[in-house]
Image (cartoon, rainbow, N blue to C red):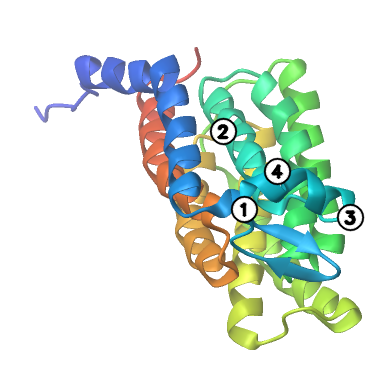
Amino acid sequence: MEKISKPNKHQGSVFRSLVNSSFIDVLGALFIVGLCLIRDFQGTYFYQGEIEFGVSIDQLFSKMKMGAYPLGIISIVGACFSLLSTRFIGKQRNSGNAIGIFTSIISGVHDFLFGNRSAIITYPISLVLNTASFTKWSQGVKIRDKDRLYYIAVILGMILGFALVYLGAYLFGGKTDHSFLIVVSITFGLSIGANFANIFKYEETWLSWMIYNVVQLIKNIMLLNIANVGKYIFYMANATITWLDWKMNGDN
């Protein structure tokens, strides 16, 4: 008679411990902040329609009095909150979805300032999906396996991603070279599918985020958004661990 293989309980408990670890939360935040400080990203400002790099920190208040927006500092803070949102969702805490609503607004503004003018019509969708996740989780939802609805959401998300990004570039301008728009379209399309999967707590949510994180790395290198480059390196490892945890251990 053929033996049926079972998940390794010890291995599963290791992944659950890593997902629930507060130490990793702090380590991830310190990693992002440290990387940004090393690259002097805190000295990045948006002033008079242009991005300025390498501004000395002692000029912070004088630049802000002149109307400059501390893009680097706010990006670092937003990246840390975004990390906490992802970690808390992995722990199956609805507070992660609540933080995600806030970080969607910050990310949308910064993407717009970095040249992605289509953010003005794409990020409201992310905001709606994050709000839907918070609402659905507050009603109680269990981890579920993929089904037809999941695949439909992934395919439609990708189609919508390309349509809205190119429409936004056509309507609002900004960076319009095709390589940039293709990367932005793919990341946005993947995020729609992943955020939809999160509403219903599909375990494949984290598989979608793994692919998303790879493409986001490429996009943020193109945008020179150093805070997000560090963030998505950490996210790759976190998404892999969380996917294995949800798959092996299920609900908390």
Tell which of 74 and 183 is nearer to you. 74
> Helix or strand or loop: what does disc 2 sit on?
helix
Frontmost of labels 2 and 3 is 3
Question: To which quarter of the image does residue 15 belong?
Answer: top left
At label 1, the amino acid type is Ser
Between 151 and 137, the one nearer to me in the picture = 137
Question: How far is disc 3 from disc 4 in space, using C-alphas?
Answer: 15 Å
How far across and how far down the image is residue 203, in percent? 50, 34
Of the numbered discs 4 and 1, the one sitting upstream in the chain is 1
The earlier-in-sequence mark between 1 and 2 is 1
Distance from the alpha carbon under mark 1 to that under mark 2: 32 Å
Residue with the mark numbered 4: 74
Q: Nearer the viewer, mark 1 or mark 2?
A: 1
Amino acid at the residue labelled 4: Ile
Label 1, secondary structure: give it.
Answer: loop
Instruction: Determine the CA span between mark 4 and mark 1.
Output: 16 Å
Amino acid under label 2? Thr
Q: What residue is pinned by disc 1? A: 56
Q: Earlier in the sequence, mark 2 or mark 3?
A: 3
- Secondary structure of the residue carrying numbered label 3: loop
The disc label shown at residue 134, or none: none
Q: Which residue is mark 3?
A: 67
Q: Residue 86, which numbered label?
A: 2
Q: Report the residue at 71% width, 73% height from top.
A: 162
